[in-house]
C-alpha cells in the first residue's frame, strides 16, 4: 500500500478520496448527534440571518468570520447541519492535500507522493470530533494555506509579498478562532531561520496579520458595535473568561490522542536518527518542532477542550511520520505498521458500532452530544430565553434575545443593581420579548420587580421554572 501512495499519479489522489469517504460516510449515514459547538453555531447563524448584528444584538464570543459563515449557511438552508458536515469534510480534505502539496514542492523529504495526505486523513478520521464544523477547524485551514508563503524565502530570495500574505492568512485564521493568533510564533521562527533581515521581515508578517483585524475593527466601528467586539470577543478570550467547554472531556481526548501521540513521538525519534541532506530540510524539521510546541501550548491554554483540538497536531504528525514510512532494511515493517494504524483508526472510530467502548475504555462521542430535555418537550418552534447556562431548550426552539452565552450575559443579569444593566435589559426585550422564559437562575422575581412593564407579563406554566408571555397559548 505504501508503494502505491508514494507515486504522484492522479489515480492515487482518487484512491485517497475513496478511502476518506469509506472511513467517514458510514457513520455520517448512520447519523452523528448534534454537538454543543454545532448548536451554538446554528443559533448564531439563525440570529444573524434574522438581521441581528454580532456583538451588538447578539452577546457571544464566536469570532467574526466564523459567525459570518454560520449566518451565510443559514441563508442557504434553515439549521443546515448536513451542510456543516459536508463543509467539515471538504476542509479537512483540503488541508491534507494542501499540506501534502507543500511537502512535495518544498522537497522536505526525499520521497514524494500522497503518503503525507494519507496519514493526515487517516488520523483526522480517528474521531467524529473532526466531523464537526468548528471555528478551530475553519481557522486552521488558513494556517495551512499560510505555510507555503513562509518557506520559499530560503531559496528564492526574500519576497515581501509572501510574508505579508502569510501574516494576512494567519490574521484571517485568528478572525475565525482567536487563539490561533499564537501561531504568529511559528511565523516568527520561520522568519528567523529563513529570512535575511529578520526584524524587517517580522514587521511585514505582523502588518499582514493586523490588516484583516483593521478591516474588522473598521466594520464594527461603523456599525456601532466596536465596544461589543472588544467586550464580548477580544477581552473574554484573551483573559480566559470564556473557557472552551464545547468539546470532549479532557480525559476522553487524552485517550484518543494515544495513537496520534505515539506516532508523533516515534516519527520525531526516527527523524533525529535520519540524515537530512539539505540545510533547508533541517530548518523545516525545526519549524515543525516549533509547531508542535505552539499546538501543545494552545491546547493547554484551552484545557484541551475546544472542539477539533486534534487538528492542531496533524501537520507536524504528518511530517514526522514520513520518516516511519521511508525505505527500510526490512521492507515489510513500514507496510505492517501502516496496516496497524489503519486498523487502530477503524477500531477507535467505530468502537460504538463494534461494541468496544468498554474494552477500549473510551466512550463514544455521541454521549457528549446535545440531548433534548424531556422537561421542555412541549416547547417546539417557540422563541424563548433561557436564564442559565443550559442551551438544550434551544435545540427545537429559537433564540429571541441577544443573550446566548450565559457567562457573557452576566454583563446585564449579573448587575441588576445597576441602572445601566436594567436599562439595557429593557431595551433588549422592548420590541420582541420571547414567548417563553426558562428561569434556571431564579432571577424572574427580581426582574419583575425592576422591569415590571416587560417581565410582569410573564406567568408560570404547569412546568416549574417555565414562564409564558401573556396571550401565548400552548399545550403543556
Image (cartoon, helix red, strand yellow):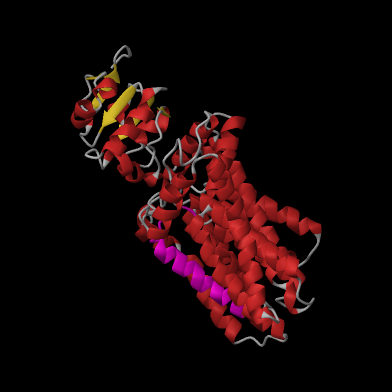
Judging depth in this view, the residue of 304 and 430 nearest the camera is 430
Compared across the picture, whether 5 is left or right of 333 comes to right
Name which quarter of the figure residue 380 lies in: top left
Residue depicted at 45% across the width and 51% down the height: 230
Residue 293 located within the stretch drawn in magenta: yes
Name which quarter of the figure residue 201 lies in: bottom right
Q: Vertically, is 158 above or below 438?
A: below
Compared across the picture, whether 211 is left or right of 228 comes to right
Which region shows up in magenta? 286-308
Q: Position of residue 438 (x, y in %)?
A: 28, 29
**Total count of labels:** 0
Judging depth in this view, the residue of 212 and 117 nearest the camera is 212
Please identify the dominant SS of the magenta region. Answer: helix
Residue depicted at 26% across the width and 24% down the height: 455
Residue 292 visible in the shown view: yes
Q: For the C terminus, which image quadrant?
A: top left
Q: Position of residue 353 (x, y in %)?
A: 46, 46
Residue 118 visible in the shown view: no
Residue 121 located within the stretch drawn in magenta: no
Q: For the N terminus, which image quadrant?
A: bottom right
Q: Position of residue 147 (x, y in %)?
A: 66, 66
Residue depicted at 49% across the width and 36% down the height: 42
Judging depth in this view, the residue of 379 and 82 nearest the camera is 379
Q: Vertically, is 419 above or below 115?
A: above
Judging depth in this view, the residue of 271 and 290 nearest the camera is 290
Q: Position of residue 216 (x, y in %)?
A: 58, 49
Q: Vertically, is 410 above or below 333?
A: above
Amino acid at each position: 500500500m505504501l508503494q502505491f501512495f508514494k507515486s504522484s499519479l492522479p489515480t492515487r489522489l482518487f484512491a485517497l478520496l475513496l478511502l476518506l469517504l469509506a472511513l467517514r460516510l458510514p457513520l455520517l449515514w448512520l447519523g452523528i448527534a448534534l454537538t454543543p459547538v454545532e448548536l451554538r453555531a446554528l443559533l448564531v447563524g439563525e440570529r444573524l440571518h434574522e438581521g441581528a448584528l454580532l456583538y451588538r444584538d447578539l452577546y457571544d464570543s464566536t469570532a467574526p468570520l466564523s459567525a459570518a459563515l454560520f449566518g451565510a449557511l443559514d441563508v442557504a438552508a434553515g439549521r443546515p447541519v448536513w451542510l456543516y458536515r459536508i463543509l467539515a469534510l471538504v476542509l479537512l480534505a483540503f488541508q491534507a492535500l494542501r499540506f501534502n502539496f507543500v511537502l512535495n514542492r518544498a522537497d522536505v523529504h526525499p520521497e514524494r507522493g500522497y503518503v503525507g495526505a494519507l496519514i493526515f486523513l487517516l488520523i483526522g478520521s480517528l474521531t467524529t470530533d473532526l466531523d464537526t464544523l468548528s471555528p478551530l477547524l475553519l481557522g486552521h485551514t488558513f494556517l495551512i494555506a499560510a505555510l507555503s508563503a513562509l518557506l520559499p524565502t530560503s531559496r528564492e530570495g526574500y519576497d515581501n509579498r509572501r510574508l505579508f500574505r502569510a501574516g494576512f492568512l494567519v490574521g484571517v485564521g485568528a478572525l475565525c478562532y482567536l487563539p490561533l493568533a499564537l501561531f504568529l510564533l511559528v511565523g516568527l521562527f520561520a522568519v528567523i531561520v529563513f529570512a535575511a533581515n529578520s526584524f524587517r521581515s517580522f514587521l511585514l508578517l505582523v502588518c499582514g496579520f493586523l490588516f484583516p483585524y483593521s478591516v474588522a475593527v473598521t466594520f464594527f466601528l461603523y456599525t456601532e458595535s466596536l465596544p461589543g467586539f472588544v467586550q464580548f470577543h477580544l477581552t473574554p478570550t484573551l483573559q480566559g473568561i470564556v473557557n472552551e467547554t464545547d468539546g470532549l472531556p479532557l480525559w476522553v481526548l487524552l485517550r484518543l490522542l494515544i495513537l496520534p501521540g505515539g506516532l508523533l513521538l516515534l516519527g520525531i525519534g526516527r527523524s533525529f536518527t535520519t540524515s537530512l541532506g539539505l540545510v533547508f530540510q533541517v530548518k523545516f524539521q525545526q519549524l515543525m518542532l516549533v509547531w508542535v510546541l505552539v499546538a501543545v501550548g494552545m491546547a493547554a491554554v484551552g484545557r484541551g477542550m475546544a472542539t477539533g483540538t486534534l487538528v492542531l497536531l496533524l501537520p507536524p504528525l504528518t511530517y514526522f511520520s514520513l520518516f516511519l514510512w521511508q525505505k527500510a532494511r526490512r521492507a515489510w515493517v513500514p507496510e505492517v505498521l501502516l496496516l496497524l494504524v489503519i486498523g487502530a483508526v477503524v477500531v477507535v472510530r467505530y468502537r460504538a458500532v463494534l461494541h468496544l467502548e468498554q474494552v477500549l475504555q473510551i466512550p463514544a462521542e455521541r454521549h457528549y452530544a446535545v440531548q433534548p430535555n424531556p422537561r421542555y418537550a412541549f416547547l417546539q418552534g417557540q422563541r424563548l430565553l433561557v436564564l442559565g447556562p443550559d442551551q438544550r431548550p434551544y435545540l427545537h426552539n429559537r433564540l429571541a434575545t441577544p443573550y446566548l452565552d450565559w457567562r457573557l450575559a452576566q454583563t446585564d443579569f449579573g448587575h441588576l443593581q445597576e441602572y445601566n444593566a436594567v436599562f439595557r435589559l429593557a431595551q433588549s426585550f422592548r420590541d420582541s420579548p420571547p414567548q417563553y422564559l426558562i428561569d434556571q437562575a431564579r432571577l424572574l422575581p427580581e426582574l419583575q420587580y425592576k422591569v415590571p412593564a416587560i417581565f410582569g407579563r410573564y406567568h408560570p406554566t404547569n412546568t416549574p421554572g417555565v414562564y409564558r408571555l401573556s396571550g401565548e397559548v400552548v399545550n403543556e
